[in-house]
Amino acid sequence: MSQCQHQWKMTNIEFGFTVCERCAKTQEVRTYFSLEDTWDQYVEGDNYWTIVENAQTFRFDLKCTACNRLEKFDELMGIMYCPGCTDECKVEIQRKKGLASKTFVLVAFGFLPQALSNPLPQDKLDVLSEHFNQRRDTRRSTIKIIPFTDIEDISQCKGEFIRDVGMLSLEPEDKKTL
């Protein structure tokens, strides 16, 4: 077991898009990362795939600046914020419990359908939590990353993916005021 007090830093950063597509015939959903902003429709075997969502995102790995340990996150599609939904949802239960101790729960998603049978392991979720808490005043609040498999019915989920809108644009973003 490592004695290092890991100091995580993002590395191998790659900007692109998370693409969500659905088969018109089977209603199967799958997601993937693309370097290009694409809205193509195509046929693959008996499936008729149409892109239903395309969002800016980035991929990264984490590397410890103290011991050079590299933690790869190829299977991480994104991180979602849960605003609250049904009281029975495991994420909602953890979110409410966390509020009492000023712990904000975020949900790590993997790429579908692979992530359903092979979700991010707990040690990687812990590394993500460590990374995001290193840059916070943890006396005020902390972040805990949990797996998306805690969401029992994704079709009822009201969560929102955290993304950097405009990060790929060559034009500066318009600043809007309230």
Image (spheres, grey):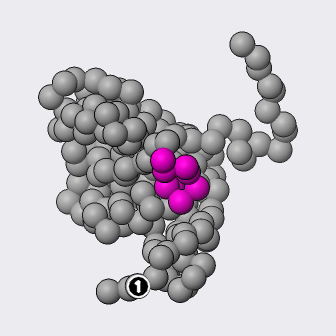
Magenta residues (range)? 132-139
Residue 87 visible in the shown view: yes
Of 4 and 124, which appears nearest the observer? 4
The N terminus lies in which quarter of the figure? bottom left
Tell me what residue is drawn at x 38 percent, y 42 percent.
Answer: 103
Residue at 55 percent across and 49 percent down: it is 137
Q: Majority secondary structure of the magenta segment?
A: loop
Residue 123 picture location, percent across and down: 32, 68
Q: Farthest residue in the top direction?
A: 178
Q: Is residue 133 magenta?
A: yes
Could you say which quadrant of the image residue 157 lies in? top left
From what the image shows, is residue 131 above or below residue 11?
above
Side of 131 relative to 178 (left or right): left
Magenta stretch encompasses residue 135: yes
Quickly name the residue at label 1. Answer: 3
Question: Residue at image x 22%, y 23%?
Answer: 86
Q: Amino acid at mark 1?
A: Gln
